[in-house]
Image (spheres, helix red, strand yellow):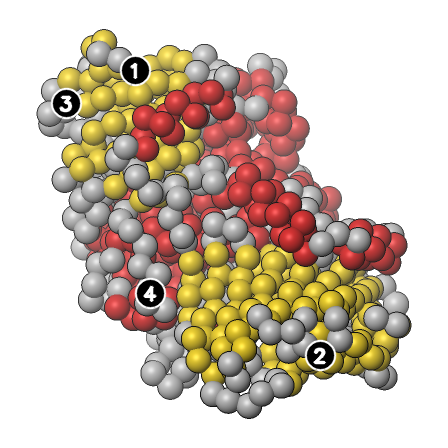
Amino acid sequence: MRYFWSFLLLIAFSACQTQGHRQELQLRFHNPATVWEETLPLGNGRIGMMPDGGIETEHIILNDITMWSGSEDPDAINPEALSYLPEIRRLLLAGKNIEAQNLMYGHFRCGGLGSAFGNGKDAPYGCFQMLGEVQIRSSYPQPGEVSNYRRVLSLNDAVASTEFTKGGVNYEREYFASHTGDVLAIAYRADKEKSVSFEIALNRPEHAGVSVERDAIVMKGQLSDGFGGDKGVRYLTRLQVINKGGSLTAGDSTLTVTGADEAVVLISTSTDMMDENYAETVDKLLKKAAGASFSHLKREHIAAYKSKFDRVTLYLGDQSNQLSTNERLNNFQTDDDPAFAALYFHYGRYLMISGTRENSLPLNLQGMWANQVQTPWNGDYHLNINVQMNYWPAEVCNLSELHKPLIDFTRSLVPSGEATAKGFYGADGWVAHMMSNPWNFTAPGEHASWGATNTGGAWLCRHLWEHYAFSQDEDYLRSVYPVMKGAAKFFLTSMIHEPTHDWLVTAPSSSPENAFYLPGSSDPAFVCMGPTMDVQIIRELFVNVLLSTVVLGMEQDSVISGIKDALPKLPPMQISPEGYLQEWLEDYREVEPQHRHVSHLYGLYPSNQISPLTTPDLAEAAKATLNRRGDGGTGWSRAWKINFWARLHDGNRSYKLLKSLLQPAVDNSMNLTGGGTYPNLFCAHPPFQIDGNFGGTAGIAEMLIQSHAGYVEVLPALPDAWPSGSFSGLRVRGGAEISAIWKDKQLKRIGIISTTGNAFKLKLPPDVVSASQKGKSIPIDNGFASISLEKGRGMIVELEY
């Protein structure tokens, strides 16, 4: 029935959305990539590649999301930390933050090397790494200049291509990471027989042995486990060439195709991290792919990919596919080009579908794409916003099943988090700090200035609740309830009473990576008690646990009664005399007022504790905070601010931040510069960090639809630059898919399909005089329309002004 209503709504919306769901959504370039940040990312959620489209020599970086060095670190629990906790807390209670901080630097940190300060490739912590690189050196039968060059990534199909003319011959290459065959596939073609000739090699900078077996190159090895042992991740990669015409000859480490009409390159790869039979898997997948035609593999891949990508449409104007993407990116600073904003939105959805899958690891700082063995910040899971931002679009953008890797990862942290809670705090429950990895690292980082934040696990628990809020799946909620409850138990047994107001606070902690000055001091202090973000996260966690007990009909126990007792003792959000929201318990002077983190506005977004309607004073304080912070910052920081301003219903300011996020991050000489966006639309921290892409996509969705306040509001933050448009398939809490059409800045039509069976409250624009469905009037009560729908049923609401 749901699909029936989807079909009807699509027909109803098609008149105003003429080409919205059929547009060619492309990244397009007129030259080969000269830097990695110009290459095109392809992936199937487990493995991926990034071709540069080189003419004489093409470089294709390969990736596997499980390509991690390191191993579980038994030294992560620092045996001396707990004994220093009472003195650290005593100093904090006495206002001696610097002395407490110095004690933490020396004693209250993880044991061992921790993350090795972001250089963990050979440490037990490890790092995410590139898999390897394919080099293809082509030779051409005729000399001549290159013309008609273009490189394209189709977001509609998840297929990339390179085309050019040389010596009177038209050459074409196609690339995709198969969502069905689970291999990487590349086709080299020409429109003249015997024109395809190349030598192909496969390598990686370290821990690799390369050999040739008949028509395949084999690369295998084992990454460092951080101890010099044999517990590191093992991997196997097989590259097979299938030529049509011509000849194929093998060298010591290369294969050479000569005079072929066409050549297909298939790459099968895996590790033993999540597949103990990885070698068998590699061979099986390669054999199956080699037995099918390239066109068959491509056709099946596209169908599987589109089953996710086509769930959502956004039309803000016709796409311009004549200009290159880097030209459109540069022009966007002075030309509004609404269609380019829509392209960027869809690119974030593309990256999520391509970067993760249901039974894989979560997206890391690099997503799943890297061109180094020592990735920036280890390419790990930063738990003080970054991995969470990766998943902000998952629910609203109708990719709910792709939330599962983060949910499963959160579950996996519990045993380690329990040991950390007991070992560092003598507390019950579980805790995770600011960083983690596939080895379930939960200890504080090796430096308290950034590693002391202890609400990373609790922030992850927000995602457990959000998945329920959108899906209304009670069986799922029952399965994650113990995880949320365990996180709450940690804070109930670890918080202390601060002396001024007797509030319950975390101690020690920090407001992520930001510092302040104590009165009369010039020494930066990071360590504190009860920073505002901690309080907001803990309050949200406690409330979500209580809501879960109601949904699931759970009996009250000591944890639930403890939560009820603790909630009114948490510090309130405080407004400084200057009108901004305080980041700490005291109104300290910040070391860096324009700091990239805006952690104390967690309550505005992603949480729902600050609202222009229900907490107007706090909303004004949030505005003052954002104006004070400024619109600059790292790429992901700008993305976060898009969401903030959307929650404050200021679409034009959100749009200004979108322009700031899309500021070109390379100069005319292709030198990498500051924060913003690279030519291939990857987010620049700098360097590349994918969270900003997902934060930007979530921000655009937040401008179009919101459901966090107990009702659905369509176009809550529409900028003047998008006067007309449409979308379909965006999801809201309570379990529904929403579509909308607007013209001349007036919302004309809302479509709703219930995916669960529920009652929905629609907030209508203030100048709407009537709402109707099939000519029948819908009552409006104080600006709201209430609608009840059975599961799978839908309706279209027409609005009159």
Pointer 1: what residue? 786
Classify residue 112 as left or right of residue 392.
right
Amino acid type of the residue that numbered disc 3 sits on in the rendered structure: Glu
Q: Which mark is residue 259?
A: 2
Q: Residue at x 83, y 55 (%)?
A: 287
Q: Is residue 428 visible?
A: yes
Task: Tell me if label 2 and label 3 are in contact, CB under 8 Å.
Answer: no
SS of the residue at dot 2? strand
Of mark 1 and mark 4, the one earlier in the sequence is 4
Classify residue 216 as left or right of residue 348.
right
The local crowd at label 4, few if under 14, some if 14 to 19, many if 20 or more residues have their Cα within 10 Å, is few
Query: Relative to 191, does residue 548 appear above or below in the rendering?
Result: above
The span from disc 3 to disc 4 (Cα, nearest Å) is: 39 Å
Q: Residue at x 68, y 71 (%)?
A: 261
The span from disc 2 to disc 1 (Cα, nearest Å) is: 69 Å
Amino acid type of the residue that numbered disc 2 sits on in the rendered structure: Gly
Pointer 4: what residue? 322
Query: Relative to 773, does residue 485 appear above or below in the rendering?
Result: below
The span from disc 2 to disc 4 (Cα, nearest Å) is: 33 Å
Task: Tell me if label 3 and label 4 are in contact, CB under 8 Å.
Answer: no
Of the residues tagged 2 and 4, which is closer to the observer? 2
SS of the residue at dot 4? loop
The local crowd at label 2, few if under 14, some if 14 to 19, many if 20 or more residues have their Cα within 10 Å, is many
Pointer 3: what residue? 800
Picture coordinates of residue 743 (x, y %)?
Answer: 18, 37
